């Protein structure tokens, strides 16, 4: 999963994990397990933990959905490398929504769960957006094994931007994403 805060990543991730029977890893949940109250400027321990969980699940033959913003192309490439090293393809589902809608959704969230306290704060959207690197830019050199799907959670539109080694599962995912929409 990839996308700015409030674009529907977690909701979509849960739905896909349930329908596909995949293992769901939430980067925010890993942060909570590490006791982080705010988004730290450096979170190498969390990212290593996430990477180890992804590797372990994929190595055991499980499908994985990783719920995180993935704002940085470098970070996304690290994850592509884990899958590629195991001979697996990657599907990036990028959730998008208008800034106004994303911030409205964020403000509708509970104020705090005691950790990751900015999940409801629209300023978090601005911080992530300021460092956002376009997901489509990732595919200039790796489009062979990464499929890129864009889900507009406001309109319900689903577009398969690039196809990698997904072996037809992208159509199954598209069907799941369209369920209950339009």
Image: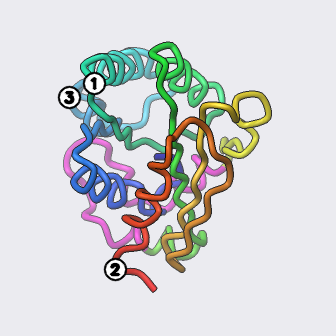
Q: Please tell me whether residue 123 belongs to the stretch shown in magenta.
A: yes
- Rendering coords of residue 58 (x, y %): 33, 23
Asked if disc 2 and disc 1 are in contact, CB closer than 8 Å, the reply is: no
Q: How many marks?
A: 3
Tell which tag, 1 or 3, sits nearer the viewer.
1
- Rendering coords of residue 158 (x, y %): 55, 67
Compute the Cα span from label 1 to label 3.
25 Å
Tell which tag, 3 or 2, sits nearer the viewer.
2
- 61 left or right, relative to 162: left
Residue closest to the eye, 95 or 147: 147
- Rendering coords of residue 44 (x, y %): 44, 16
Residue shown at 42% from the left, 67% from the top: 175
Asked if disc 3 and disc 2 are in contact, CB closer than 8 Å, the reply is: no
Q: Of the residues under marks 1 and 3, which one precedes in the sequence?
A: 3
Query: What segment carries the magenta color?
Result: 105-129
Q: Of the residues under marks 2 and 1, which one precedes in the sequence?
A: 1
Which dot marks residue 33?
3
Label 2 Cα neighbours within 10 Å, binned few <14 / some 14-19 / many ≥20: few
Residue shown at 30% from the left, 31% from the top: 31
Residue at mark 2: 180
* Residue at the extreme right: 140
* Depicted 50 relative to depicted 152: above or below: above
Which dot marks residue 61?
1
Compute the Cα span from label 2 to label 1.
30 Å
- 78 left or right, relative to 54: right
* Residue at the extreme bottom: 182
- 159 left or right, relative to 58: right
Label 3 Cα neighbours within 10 Å, binned few <14 / some 14-19 / many ≥20: few
């Amino acid at each position: 999963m990839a996308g700015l805060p409030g674009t529907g990543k977690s909701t979509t991730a849960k739905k896909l994990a349930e329908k596909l029977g995949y293992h769901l890893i939430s980067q925010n949940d890993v942060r909570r397990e590490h006791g982080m109250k705010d988004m730290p400027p450096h979170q190498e321990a969390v990212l290593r933990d996430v990477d180890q969980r992804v590797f372990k699940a994929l190595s055991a033959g499980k499908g994985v959905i990783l719920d995180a913003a993935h704002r940085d192309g470098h970070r996304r490439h690290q994850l592509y490398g884990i899958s590629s090293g195991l001979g697996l393809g990657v599907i990036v589902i990028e959730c998008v929504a208008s800034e106004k809608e994303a911030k409205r959704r964020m403000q509708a969230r509970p104020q705090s769960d005691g950790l990751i306290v900015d999940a409801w704060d629209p300023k978090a959207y601005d911080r992530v957006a300021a460092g956002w690197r376009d997901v489509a830019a990732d595919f200039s050199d790796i489009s062979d094994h990464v499929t890129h799907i864009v889900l507009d959670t406001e309109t319900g539109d689903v577009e398969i931007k690039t196809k990698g080694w997904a072996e037809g599962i992208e159509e199954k995912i598209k069907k799941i994403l369209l369920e209950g929409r339009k």
